[in-house]
Image (cartoon, rainbow, N blue to C red):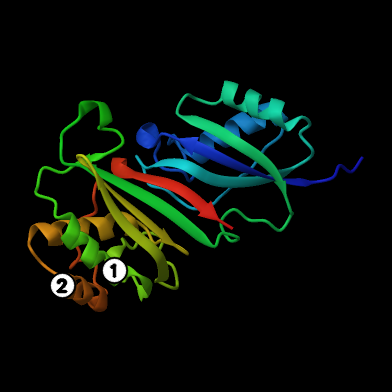
Amino acid sequence: MNLKKINYKLVIEFEGSKFYGSQYQPNRRTVQGELEKVLGVLLRRRIQIILCGRTDAGVHAKGYVVNFITDQIGNEKKFIKSLNATLPADLAVLSIERVSLDFHARYSAKQRTYQYTLSTVKSPLERRRIWYCRYPVRVSQMRKMSTVFLGTHDFSAFSVRGSDPKSRLCTINEFSLRKKNEFIVFTISANRFLYKMVRMIIGTLVRAGIKYQDSRRIIEIMNQRDNRLAYAPVPAQGLCFLHVRY
């Protein structure tokens, strides 16, 4: 009997401290590995999920999207409850939705949004979700410099050549900074991101602010397209994948 294939879209949340990133790696604990394992047990068949993007070890997510194609799974609300009852405590499914067969979590995405949080006050309770920056942080200066990144640019200088895609052009649509008490939150949206791009951009902004540099230095680094000129990426634990727009 031929069963109808259905494409399911899941929105998931995970706390990334104990994951070696989202993408499957042999002999490593990953989001994809854990989710596929549980889906395979519940559906009694091998399931391969498609990720909306790759996150590094230690990075968190609130509205991360995956999809997979399988036969009809029955009551979807009950299925989510079964999933969350079986998944580890640092990974949860927030919603499930039937989508068209041509929907692809990665290639159908129009915009992805990340948030990075640093704190000027040390907090052991928040250490897995923020970066404690012990240096003076100049928010107004960083906000002015951040406008340089808006638009379409070659971001070779702000990425590590891990996956080495053919094109290194990305379009940043939104980039904001806000300060609330001791926390400084960066929110950045783009059509795509290169490997470690967000963390290198923020690392460069923070260090340029510390050194009293201005936008001209950022433009110089970008135009040189040499990642040796940019500053080191900020630590992964402060980064969270917020959501993706289709």
Placement of the N terminus among the 4 image quadrants: top right
Asked if residue 42 lies left or right of residue 207, the reply is: right
Residue for badge 2: 217
Residue for badge 1: 147
Residue 231 visible in the picture: no
* Residue located 59% across and 32% down the image: 37
**SS at mark 2?**
helix
* Residue located 74% across and 54% down the image: 101
Residue 102 horizontal/vertical position (percent): 71, 58
Q: Nearer the viewer, residue 16 or 145?
A: 145
* Residue located 42% across and 70% down the image: 171
Placement of the C terminus among the 4 image quadrants: bottom right
**Comparing marks 2 and 1, which lies closer to the viewer?**
1
Q: Residues within 10 Å of mark 2 (few under 14, many from 20)?
A: some
View extreme (right): residue: 1
Q: Please state which amino acid type lies under the numbered disc 2.
A: Arg
**SS at mark 1?**
helix
